[in-house]
Image (cartoon, helix red, strand yellow):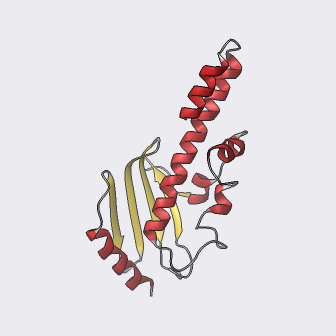
């Protein structure tokens, strides 16, 4: 089943508008999909490897990622927010309480109607959120180190981030 599903999704990718700097390749017999982003959020040269061989689309694919040809890491390492103050910033800029629990890659949230495009759109969104959170946390550090920083300027910069 996954092989036919991937073939149909590949046909859609060919006809769909392509994003600049995003490259896809699929090994149909092995049911492995590779998606490479030249730049995603603040990350450069990131590759997602999706293993659809188990029971996709009835279960989500196993996903690992690599940055700059480094070691492969589980996708949850990219989604999980571990920094102090990160969850508070996440709540302030989004409707999510926890990215790990809200993702369609959580077994409780997955449905066979989701496809690779849904997964990639969500991952792109989550990476953007992580970059915003990182920038807001850096701004908070800046405010702590400079006591004379004007509060109105801080608020203006934070609303931009």
Question: Which quarter shows the N terminus?
Answer: bottom left
Residue 70: x and y in percent read 47, 49
Is residue 82 visible from the viewing direction of this image? no
Q: Residue at x 54, y 41 (%)?
A: 131
Left or right placement of residue 80 versus residue 55 in this view: right
Q: Where in the figure is residue 50, as x and y percent of width and height?
A: 47, 68
* 116 vs 84: above or below: below
Instruction: Out of 69 and 45, give the one closest to the viewer.
Output: 45
**122 vs 26: above or below:** above
Q: Is residue 149 above or below residue 1?
A: above
Q: Residue at x 39, y 64 (%)?
A: 34
Q: Farthest residue to the bottom: give it.
A: 1
For residue 103, which quarter of the picture? bottom right
What residue is shown at x 52% (from left), y 72% (from top)?
61
Q: Above or below — where is 33 with respect to 99?
A: below
Q: Residue furthest top?
A: 148
Image quadrant containing the C terminus: top right
Report if residue 114 is visible in the image. yes
Q: How many marks?
A: 0
State the image coordinates of residue 141 (x, y, percent, origin top left): 67, 26
* x then y, percent, for residue 38: 36, 48
């Amino acid at each position: 089943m996954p092989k036919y599903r991937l073939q149909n999704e590949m046909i859609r990718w060919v006809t769909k508008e392509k994003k600049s700097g995003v490259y896809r390749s699929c090994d149909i017999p092995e049911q492995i999909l590779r998606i490479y982003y030249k730049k995603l959020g603040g990350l450069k040269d990131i590759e997602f490897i999706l293993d659809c061989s188990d029971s996709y689309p009835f279960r989500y694919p196993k996903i690992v990622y690599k940055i700059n040809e480094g070691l492969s890491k589980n996708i949850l390492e990219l989604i999980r927010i571990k920094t102090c103050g990160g969850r508070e910033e996440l709540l302030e800029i989004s409707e999510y309480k926890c990215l790990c629990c809200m993702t369609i890659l959580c077994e409780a949230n997955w449905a066979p109607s989701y496809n690779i495009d849904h997964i990639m759109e969500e991952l792109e969104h989550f990476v953007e959120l992580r970059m915003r959170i990182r920038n807001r946390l850096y701004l908070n550090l800046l405010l702590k180190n400079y006591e004379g920083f004007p509060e109105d300027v801080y608020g203006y910069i934070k609303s931009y981030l």
